[in-house]
Each structure stands twice: as C-alpha cells, then as structure tokens.
Image (cartoon, grey):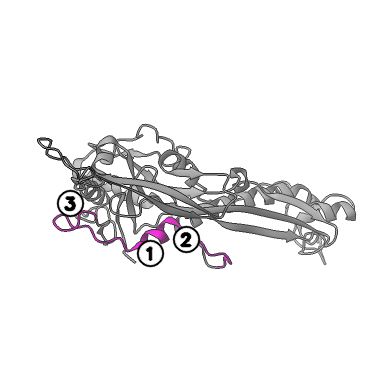
C-alpha cells in the first residue's frame, strides 16, 4: 500500500532548544576597570562640566653669598585647569507582543497565557532579550569612551582618541622637540621577518618609552620620572597586543613576560597586561582603541566621568498601558578628558589628524 501526506509540511522541531540562543560574540566594557587602575574615574557628577586642577612650577637657586631684594627670582608657581564635560545618553526600545510576529512562529509557545498577560510580558523570551541588550549597551559605552559618537547616534561626544587627534600637540623629535607627542604614524606590524622593522609593535613601544625618557627638564615636567617609577601604561588594541608578541618572539625567541603587578587580569583575564621588558610600566589592551594608535600615558591622565555609576549598567523595563507595549530605557552620563593633553603626559604612535 502507498501512503500519501497530502497538504502536510515537513515537521521541524523548534521547541526543545528554543532558548538555546547562539548569541553574538561581543567585546564588553573594559573601560571602567582600566580607568580605575590606570586613569581617573569621577562618579557622582550632577553638573555637566567640572574643572580639574593642575599645578606646575619652577625653582631657581640663587647665590646665597649676598642679600637680595628679588625674593622670588627664578621661582614661579602656576595653578591651572583642564575641563571634563559629560553628556546625557539615552537608549530605548519597545516591543508589542500582539504584533511583530511573536505569535506567528515558535516564539508563540513561550508567551504567557492570556492576552492581558501577553501585553505585559514577553514570557520566557524577555529575560534573554534584556540580558542581550545589557551586553550591547556595555559595548557601546566602551566604543564611545575611545571613539566618540558613532553613525546613527543623535548625541555628539568626543572619546579619548578624538581628543588626542583634535589637540594637534606636535611631533616628537629627540633633538628639537622633546615635548612633542606624536612619535610615528606608520601602520603597526609584527616587525617584519626579522622583527627589526620600526613599525613592529614591540619596537614602537620601545620608541615611545625612549621618547618619554628624553623628557627631563631643568624647569618643567619630567616624563622620565613616570617611566622609571612605573607610573605609566602603554595602551593598545587586542590586535596590536598579538603583533607585539610576534615582534618580540622574532627578536628574542621568547614569549612576552606576562602579568604586570596591579594590572594582571584587568579585563577578567581576557587580556592580562604585559610588563614592558626592562621597565615597570604595563602594556594593557583596550578593545576599542584603534589598531592605528598605540598610546603611552601617565597614570591618572585619562579621565572618565559619570553621574551615578550604577546608571551605566541599569536598565529600566516596564509595561506601558497607554501604548500597550513593553518598553526599556537606559539613561546615563559620561564624558572623557585628559588631565595633561601634551607631550609631557603622553606619547603616541598613530595618525596626527
């Protein structure tokens, strides 16, 4: 006998693994733990701008063999300010559980019983959606911290990389401009077949350290002091971290020494810090610093400001009876600054504009 299955469609099981989602792999918010360890974190900003004070000075030794009416000769103190500006951010979305095909596909069997209850909750799907939204917001905070506003954003904010390029703080030259900040502009690599190319990331880091060590002034800031004491970090992307390791292997045949004290496991052990060989300074990865840029910066120089810190991870979810939709909203403040945006507080390899 023959069997017929007229009018049927092939069966596909859609329920047994219905919540076993394959989520997008996302680079998370590694900015806050980094800024706490190596920068300046300023919470509880109700105001939109805040002055950050600076103190510099010069001293001169006078001839003590005679009396002098010029009591302050050669001795000066300068009190200045840099400014941190924060912006208000808002992210929001709504869902209608009676539309958008929730009842058309396998998602229907995860909705709560009853039409009123379905208005107020997406059932088993809602916690998965909210958890994924939180991950995406965390990623955007980290992106904006380094790269500022992105395509599709309606706010305008400058990240650290934007501020760095906008400052036009000069090109470093060992013989004529030790206070310049830009040490090189070519694309970072693994150092070539022998590891000796100047564009190799390890070689770039060596150039940055050398440039900072050259800043020793009779009157003025000595970046060299921060390098000697380990009061500085080199910041690079995950890609450049790997190129640095390859460069170092080609040069010396050994892998990079891991885990700089105090910064090991900075990002949940995802990218533990290197310690720059021969120095106390750390080499730290940040997910969203561009591959074109490698930054050597004094500890405390990078600034991140916000209002209530918990706002950065808080997501408000509610049912709107007026619109018969489930809504979520995130609100926070954030802003970035440098306390010393010049070659006395940072050196970098990358574009100048």
Quarter holding the N terminus? bottom right
Spatial CA distance of label 1 from label 2 is 10 Å
Q: Which residue is mark 1?
A: 166
| Sequence-first tag of 1 and 2 | 2
Element at badge 2? loop
Disc 2 residue crowd, few under 14, some 14–19, many 20+, Cα 10 Å: many
Q: Which residue is mark 3?
A: 196
Front in this rendered view, residue 142 or 197: 142
Query: Is residue 108 toward the left or the right of residue 159 in the image?
Result: right
Q: Residue at x 19, y 43 (%)?
A: 69
Q: Which mark is residue 207?
A: none
Mark 1 and 2 residues: CB-CB less than 8 Å, in contact? yes
Task: Verify whether residue 176 appears in magenta.
Answer: yes
Residue 231 place in picture, x, y as percent: 32, 38
Q: Residue at x 48, y 38 (%)?
A: 268
Extent of the magenta region = 152-179
Residue 138 place in picture, x, y as percent: 56, 50
Dominant secondary structure (helix, strand or loop) of the stretch shown in magenta: loop
Query: Is residue 49 toward the left or the right of residue 259 in the image?
Result: right
Q: Which residue is mark 2?
A: 158
Spatial CA distance of label 3 from label 2 is 36 Å
Q: Mark 3 or mark 2: which is in front?
A: 2
Residue 123 place in picture, x, y as percent: 79, 49
Residue 238 position (above or below residue 278): below
């Amino acid at each position: 006998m023959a069997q017929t299955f007229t009018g049927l469609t092939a069966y596909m099981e859609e329920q047994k693994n219905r919540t076993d989602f394959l989520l997008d792999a996302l680079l998370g918010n590694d900015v806050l733990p980094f800024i706490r360890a190596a920068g300046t974190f300023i919470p509880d900003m109700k105001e939109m701008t805040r002055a950050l004070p600076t103190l510099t000075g010069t001293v001169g030794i006078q001839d003590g063999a005679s009396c002098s009416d010029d009591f302050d000769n050669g001795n000066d103190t300068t009190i200045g300010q840099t400014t941190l500006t924060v912006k208000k951010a808002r992210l929001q979305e709504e869902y209608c559980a009676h539309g958008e095909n929730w009842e058309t596909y396998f998602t229907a069997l995860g909705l709560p019983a009853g039409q009123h209850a379905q208005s107020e909750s997406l059932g088993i799907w809602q916690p998965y959606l909210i958890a994924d939204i939180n991950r995406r917001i965390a990623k955007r905070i980290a992106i904006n911290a380094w790269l500022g506003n992105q395509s599709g954003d309606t706010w305008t904010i400058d990240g650290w990389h934007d501020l760095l390029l906008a400052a036009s703080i000069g090109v470093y030259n060992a013989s004529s401009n030790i206070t310049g900040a830009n040490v090189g502009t070519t694309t970072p690599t693994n150092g070539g077949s022998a590891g000796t190319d100047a564009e190799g990331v390890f070689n770039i880091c060596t150039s940055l350290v050398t440039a900072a060590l050259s800043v020793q002034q009779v009157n003025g800031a000595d970046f060299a002091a921060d390098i000697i004491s380990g009061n500085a970090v080199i910041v690079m992307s995950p890609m450049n971290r790997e190129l640095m390791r390859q460069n170092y292997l080609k040069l010396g045949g050994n892998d990079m020494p891991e885990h700089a004290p105090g910064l090991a496991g900075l990002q949940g052990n995802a990218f533990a810090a290197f310690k720059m060989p021969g120095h106390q300074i750390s080499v730290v990865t940040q997910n969203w610093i561009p591959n074109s840029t490698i930054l050597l910066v004094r500890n405390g120089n990078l600034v991140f400001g916000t209002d209530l810190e918990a706002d950065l991870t808080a997501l408000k979810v509610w049912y709107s009876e007026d619109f018969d939709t489930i809504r979520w909203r995130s609100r926070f403040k954030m802003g970035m600054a440098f306390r010393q945006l010049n070659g006395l507080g940072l050196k970098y390899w990358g574009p100048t504009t």
